[in-house]
Amino acid sequence: MRGTGNSVVSRCGRLHPRRNETTRASKSEGAIDRFAQPFVFARLRILASPAALAQTYPDRNVTIVVTTAAGALTDTLTRAVAQQLSEMWKQSVIVENRSGAGYSIAAQSVMRGEHDGYTLLASETGFYTTQPHLYAEGKLAYDAERDFVPVAGYGTIPTALLVNPSVPVNSVSDLIALAKKKPGAVTFGTAGVGSALHIAGLELESLTGIKMTAVHYRGAAPALSDVIAGHINAVIMGPSVALSSVKLGKLKMLAFGSEKRVPQFPAEIIKKVNADVQKIVSDPEFQKKYLERLAVQPVPGPIDAFAEYLRTDSAKWREVIKAANVKIE
């Protein structure tokens, strides 16, 4: 079952520098596989030879701007990684929260900064894979693929399809059958138009040919609360905050899933940050303390594979969003 990916991300996170200006589930469960992956981006400009930059970087404080509020999963993982990077680099790594307007407030903050690799963006993969397809051309102040480059990912967040116990279903197949029998009657919560929760629901509709009704909230927490209260039927989201309610019988879990380099950029710096982040998220102690506790799966791998993952995911979500005719004005 596959969801969307946290660049710090929603997916947890990934690291991206800004580009220089000059278990496989069935098809019906595709929307509830991996959820968000956190990643990091940065703006970079070559001010010296790449080799020299790599040897001295970082020689002062580094700031990571996070697209979520403090306490959210992307923020939690970013702060954990930042602490480890600070110890490795012998420099302060400062985390700033700039949530709001999807990923735009944080992204524009990084865009306004220097292109020197000392201001990074930590975000869910939706910044790169879904947001660009939700806006008409020219509506966003940046182009994620043109202006930012992937650096490193933290991990993937498996997603769960959760329903209120009163809904007469016990499997994904049951829910699909109910939705086909009563088009539009099944309601699902989102964290807002175009959010990861919304897109996951749209993909489930696209894959199965069903029609549900999206109910939009200002965040995932109120959407989950209304599923528990019985005000709406379902939600597709990361399971970590819902597991206790599942154990208490307040929720039913129907499914649980897991699973171009820019030549102007100083590749040595990108490689260094990627290698250091991957060293952190691959450490068994870090995984036990942070990833396992939050139901996040590490995504170690080379930069090229990470970038290709983002491009593939972006193409997939473009088709889902286009088919659902979802646009943010």
Image (cartoon, rainbow, N blue to C red):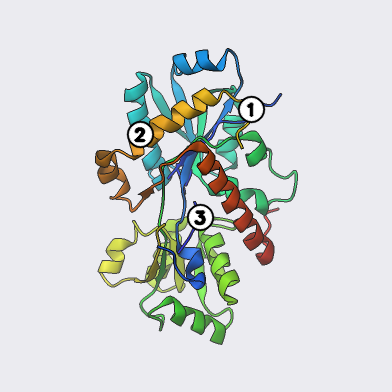
Which of marks 3 and 1 precedes in the sequence? 3
Mark positioned earlier in the residue sequence (2 or 3): 3
* Number of residues whose C-alpha sits closer than 10 Å to that of mark 1, classed few (under 14), some (14–19) or many (20 or more): few
Q: Residues within 10 Å of mark 2 (few under 14, many from 20)?
A: some
Separation of residues labelled 1 and 3 (CA atoms): 28 Å
Which one is in front, 81 or 308?
308
| Residue at 53% from the left image edge and 66% from the top image edge | 201
Q: Is 312 placed above or below 249 here?
A: above
Write the residue at 55% across / 49% down.
126
Tell me which corner region of the image, top left, top right, bottom left or bottom right, holds residue 90: top left
Q: Amino acid at mark 2?
A: Lys
Q: Nearer the viewer, mark 1 or mark 3?
A: 1
- Is tag 2's residue or tag 1's residue first in the polypeptide sequence? 1
The amino acid pointed to by label 3 is: Thr
Q: Is residue 72 visible?
A: no
Name which residue type carries label 1.
Pro
Up-down relation of residue 82 to residue 7 (above or below): above
Residue bearing the label numbered 1: 263
Q: Secondary structure at mark 1?
A: loop
Residue 313 appears at what percent x and percent y?
57, 53
Instruction: Give the CA separation, mark 2 to mark 3.
Output: 24 Å
In which image quadrant can residue 252 be found?
bottom left
317 to the left or right of 64: right
Counting from the top left corner in percent of width and height, residue 297 is at 37, 50
Q: Residue at x 39, y 36 (%)?
A: 278
Q: Position of residue 184 (x, y in %)?
A: 58, 78
> Which residue is under mark 3?
4
- Nearest to the observer: residue 90 or residue 282: 282
**Residue at label 2?**
279
Of residues 105 and 83, which is closer to you in this image? 83
